[in-house]
Amino acid sequence: PGYKVGYFVGSLSSRSINRVLARALIRLSPEGLEFTEIAIDNLPLYSPDLDDSFPPEATALKEAITSSDAVLFVTPEYNRSIPGALKNAIDWASRPWGQNSFHHIPAGVIGASIGPIGTAVAQQSLRSVLSFCNARQMTSPEAYVHYTPAVFADTGEVMNEETAAYLHNYMAEFRDHVERVLTVLPRARD
Ligand code: FNR
């Protein structure tokens, strides 16, 4: 069967290298995954004052997650953590209390940086947030991507064979992870 993957790009930049990475991952993904971006750029800042009257953008965010079989986070590292815009989206999706949209959802974490650490610290930070949100994360393999324009074309084409194989393997493992979680917990999210 095919699995619907809702993916988050953690950057609001119009020239985001993480959006380029997302394009590359989609191009290199194995059969059986269908991708839809879940937007985070239209959300107001979360406040508990709005728990009783969610804005339509936040309701749409929760519905996009609920209608996905799995979620994939493709995020930059900002100051050794994740960008505030992504954290804001996660906070919205986790609320109102008792209606956390990430409960038991299969999840993957990946990111690209212009520095050699490749978002490793941001990914650890994101993983603790997703753990608390009870998402079922793929913990291995990890993928820390050092972006260079010589390797990644804006279209998502990956010009280096070794990098392409590495990203393909990440997505093949992610597909298997999604299948495994949904086999064990087929109705756990209802
Ligand atoms: C950065 N950048 C960065 N890189 C990194 O490896 N570790 C970090 O902690 C930070 N911190 C950071 C903070 C802020 C506010 C900005 C704007 C940038 C650099 C970052 O990797 C680079 O800007 C990427 O291009 C961001 O990804 P997107 O937005 O292009 O997808």
Image (cartoon, helix red, strand yellow):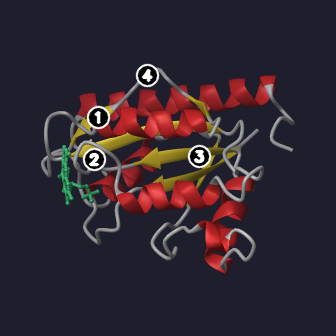
> Where residue 170 sits in the image (x, y, percent)?
44, 30
Residue under numbered circle 1: 121
Q: CA distance from mark 1 to mark 2?
A: 7 Å
Left or right: residue 65 compared with residue 161:
right
The reply to whether the C-beta atoms of the residues labelled 4 and 2 are less than 8 Å apart is no
> Where residue 161 sits in the image (x, y, percent)?
26, 32
Residue under numbered circle 2: 77
> Where residue 142 sits in the image (x, y, percent)?
39, 26
> Where residue 190 sits in the image (x, y, percent)?
87, 44
Q: CA distance from mark 4 to mark 3?
A: 16 Å
Mark 1 CB lies closer than 8 A to ligand 1 = yes
> Residue placed at 64% from the left, 52% from the top?
94
Instruction: Look at label 2 and name its amino acid.
Output: Glu
For the residue pair 117 and 121, the one nearer the viewer reads as: 121
Instruction: Look at label 1 and name its amino acid.
Output: Val
**N-terminal label among 2 and 3:** 3
